[in-house]
Amino acid sequence: MSSEKLSSEKTEKARMLAGELYLASDSELAAEAMRARELLQQFNQTAAADREGRRAILRQLLGQVGEQPSIVPPFHCDYGIHISIGDRFYMNYGGVILDCNQVEIGDDVLCAPYVQIYAATHPTDPAVRLTGRELALPVKIGNNVL
């Protein structure tokens, strides 16, 4: 089989995670994004003192969660399931992680208020952009990063 044919058999999600052009309006991706929005709504409405409740929601929302995570609401992401956070990860108010591809964050990482981490990007060719296809590349942040 040619690689062109193999590529055409991929799902939009597989294309997205492979760093290829994909359609974000795909029904599978839309369902995963809706799941994330519902969990984010719960997370962002938790009581300030309910740290364990927040952590429980993070464990449902994110792909991998290390020990003692702390994300201060409001927090926003695309899918959640493509995010991996290490031990003692801290993100202050207003954090955004656009996880259209894998976002891997190490141990002991501290994020200031309104930090934004984007796996999402767009084609630079206007003709390709007009097709509605998007692009996403993986993000990896090591340990002990401020």
Image: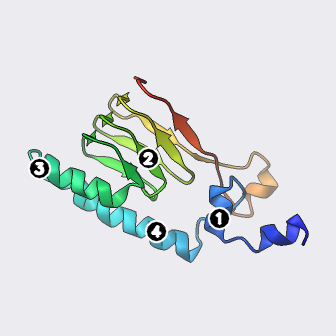
Q: Which residue is mark 2?
A: 84
Which one is nearer the viewer's eye here, 75 or 62? 62
Q: Which residue is mark 1?
A: 14
**Residue 53 shown left or right of residue 134 in the figure:** left
Picture layout, residue 80 above or below residue 141: below
Query: Could you say which quadrant of the image residue 39 lies in?
Result: bottom left
Quadrant in which the C terminus appears? top left
SS under mark 3: loop
All told, the count of numbered labels is 4
SS under mark 2: strand
Residue 75 x %, y %: 32, 47
| Cα–Cα gap, marks 1 and 4 | 13 Å
- Please give the label number shown on residue 32: 4
Q: Residues within 10 Å of mark 3 (few under 14, many from 20)?
A: few
Residue in the image at 66% along x and 71% along y: 11
**Residue 11 shown left or right of residue 99 in the figure:** right
Residue 92 x %, y %: 29, 34
Picture layout, residue 20 above or below residue 142: below
Residue in the image at 53% along x and 69% along y: 29
Q: Residues within 10 Å of mark 1 (few under 14, many from 20)?
A: some
| Cα–Cα gap, marks 4 and 2 | 16 Å
Report the mark closest to the observer, 4 or 2: 2
Residue 72 x %, y %: 24, 41
| Cα–Cα gap, marks 3 and 4 | 26 Å
Sequence-earlier tag: 3 or 2: 3
Image marks 1 and 3: residues in contact by CB distance under 8 Å: no
SS under mark 4: helix
